[in-house]
Image (cartoon, rainbow, N blue to C red):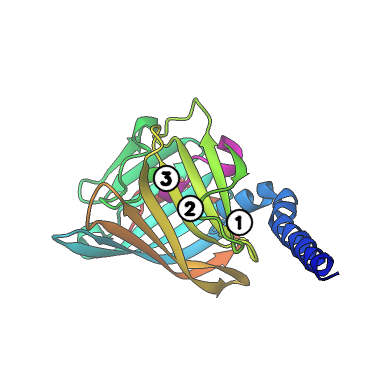
């Protein structure tokens, strides 16, 4: 009778353990991965947006901070204007659909950025042109799936995104890590075509902006440049606002006083 009681307890524990271990799998099966990726894609944008932010570029030998304003309309239009320091004041970046231009006030020239330069550094930072103006969309230009990793925990969701073969990007894949309770991202891991981790984008300091809870700080850390990192801090963000269409024009790009 004692052996039977012991066996019963063992079976009961195994059943409970099986039930508990099955919870994450069931939850994973019900994940709306499309929604997660779309929310990450549009986290700082929405139908339209205006933001005030600062970018701190850090290297082993120097650092500098840029203050700037930015406007966006959907995923197709972006305008950024640097306000300080004096050396970069007035520099502007405009993206409309698949075209991008930079304005350099010192030479009073507008330079068109070719597609091959979209993955180049923006203003000497660790962010690329594409990172800032979002020419490529995770939701539209990548395939993605929920994955399991050695570091998987009950509080995190890992989603791997693979770019389309015709996209001029250097990444073999991007792994997006979000919190399971609110889908707020905590990091993005960028891998090359050899599956080597090249850089990590960290998200932190979640705040409420215009009724939306999002990370107010992004930190890009390249793993092949020791001591280098770039932080973007959002100071203010407004969503779904009316934006004059003249904002997204070459004339406005040049017109800085």
Q: Give the residue pinned by disc 1.
A: 46
Q: Earlier in the sequence, mark 2 or mark 1?
A: 1
Query: In this image, 83 relative to 175: left or right?
Result: left
Q: Is residue 36 magenta?
A: no
Residue 88, given in percent of the width and then of the height, sits at 24, 57
| Quarter that holds the C terminus | bottom left
Q: CA distance from mark 2 to mark 3?
A: 32 Å
Mark 2 in CB contact with mark 3 (< 8 angstroms) = no
Q: Is residue 257 visible?
A: no
| Residue 227 sits in quarter | bottom left
Q: Give the residue pinned by disc 2.
A: 247
Q: Camera-side residue: 171 or 8?
A: 8
| Residue 152 sits in quarter | bottom right
Q: Give the residue pinned by disc 3.
A: 190
Q: Secondary structure at mark 1?
A: loop
Q: Earlier in the sequence, mark 2 or mark 3?
A: 3
Residue 111, given in percent of the width and then of the height, sits at 31, 38
User: Relative to 65, is 104 above or below?
Assistant: above
Q: Earlier in the sequence, mark 1 or mark 3?
A: 1
Q: CA distance from mark 2 to mark 1?
A: 17 Å
User: Relative to 85, is 111 above or below?
Assistant: above
Magenta extent: 131-142
Q: Is residue 90 visible?
A: yes
Q: Is residue 134 magenta?
A: yes
């Amino acid at each position: 009778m004692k052996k039977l009681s012991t066996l019963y307890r063992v079976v009961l524990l195994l059943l409970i353990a099986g039930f508990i271990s099955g919870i994450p799998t069931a939850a994973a099966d019900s994940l709306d991965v499309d929604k997660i990726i779309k929310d990450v894609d549009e986290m700082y944008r929405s139908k339209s947006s205006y933001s005030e932010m600062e970018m701190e570029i850090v290297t082993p030998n120097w650092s500098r901070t840029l203050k700037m304003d930015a406007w966006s309309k959907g995923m197709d239009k972006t305008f950024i204007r640097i306000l300080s320091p004096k050396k970069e004041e007035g520099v502007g970046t405009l993206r409309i659909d698949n075209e991008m231009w930079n304005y350099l006030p010192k030479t009073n020239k507008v330079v068109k950025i070719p597609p091959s330069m979209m993955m180049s550094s923006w203003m000497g930072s660790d962010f690329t042109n594409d990172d800032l103006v979002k020419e490529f969309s995770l939701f539209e230009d990548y395939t993605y799936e929920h994955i399991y990793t050695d570091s998987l925990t009950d509080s995190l969701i890992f989603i791997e995104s693979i770019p389309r073969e015709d996209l001029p990007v250097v990444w073999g894949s991007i792994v997006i890590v979000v919190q399971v309770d609110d889908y707020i991202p905590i990091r993005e891991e960028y891998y090359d075509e050899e599956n080597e981790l090249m850089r990590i984008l960290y998200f932190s300091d979640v705040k409420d902006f215009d009724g939306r809870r999002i990370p107010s700080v992004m930190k890009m850390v390249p793993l092949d440049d020791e001591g280098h990192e770039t932080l973007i801090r959002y100071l203010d963000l407004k969503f779904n606002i009316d934006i004059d269409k003249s904002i997204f024009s070459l004339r406005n790009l040049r017109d800085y006083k």
